Image: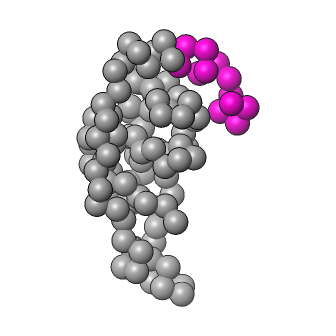
Amino acid sequence: MLQLRPTCEHCNRDLPPDSSDAMICSYECTFCKDCVSIVLENVCPNCGGGFCQRPVRPSRNIKNGNYLGNQPASTRVVYRPVEIETHRKFAKNIKLIPHDER
């Protein structure tokens, strides 16, 4: 089950569970849309993978108790600002490879 981390790992911007600005890689590294597009160039600094929009967990019980009330979002903040120049060198060639081919 997704952790739904509460903030962007780079800029520490709040990303509540219903945020449409939350982006994740396949390891659930979580960043805001602005950091993914402007700073990270759609390359995860932790694994080199790409990002997609994080799904929103229902806020109310629509079916079988599968909602935030039973499975709350994580409160653990992961704040690891990216060293931009180092990341640009890392992402230089990776960003040219479609994320589904990395």
Tell me where residue 70 sits by quadrant. Answer: bottom left
Q: Position of residue 98 (x, y in %)?
A: 68, 28
Q: Residue at x 42, y 45 (%)?
A: 30
Report the coloring of the rendering: one colour
100 in the magenta segment: yes
Q: Residue at x 49, y 24 (%)?
A: 41
Q: Does residue 73 appear in the picture of this structure?
A: yes
Left/right of residue 75 with respect to residue 100 in the rendered view: left
Tell me where residue 84 sits by quadrant. Answer: top left
76 in the magenta segment: no
Q: Does residue 42 appear in the picture of this structure?
A: no
Question: Which range is magenta?
Answer: 91-102
Near-viewer residue (34 or 78): 78
Residue 26, above or below 88: below
- Point out the image quarter for the C terminus: top right
Q: Residue furthest bottom?
A: 64
Near-viewer residue (31 or 3): 3
Q: Position of residue 62 (x, y in %)?
A: 50, 83
Q: Position of residue 77 (x, y in %)?
A: 28, 50
Q: Residue at x 56, y 30 (%)?
A: 48
Q: Residue at x 44, y 19 (%)?
A: 87
Q: Residue furthest right?
A: 101
Near-viewer residue (85 or 17): 85
Q: Position of residue 86 (x, y in %)?
A: 41, 15
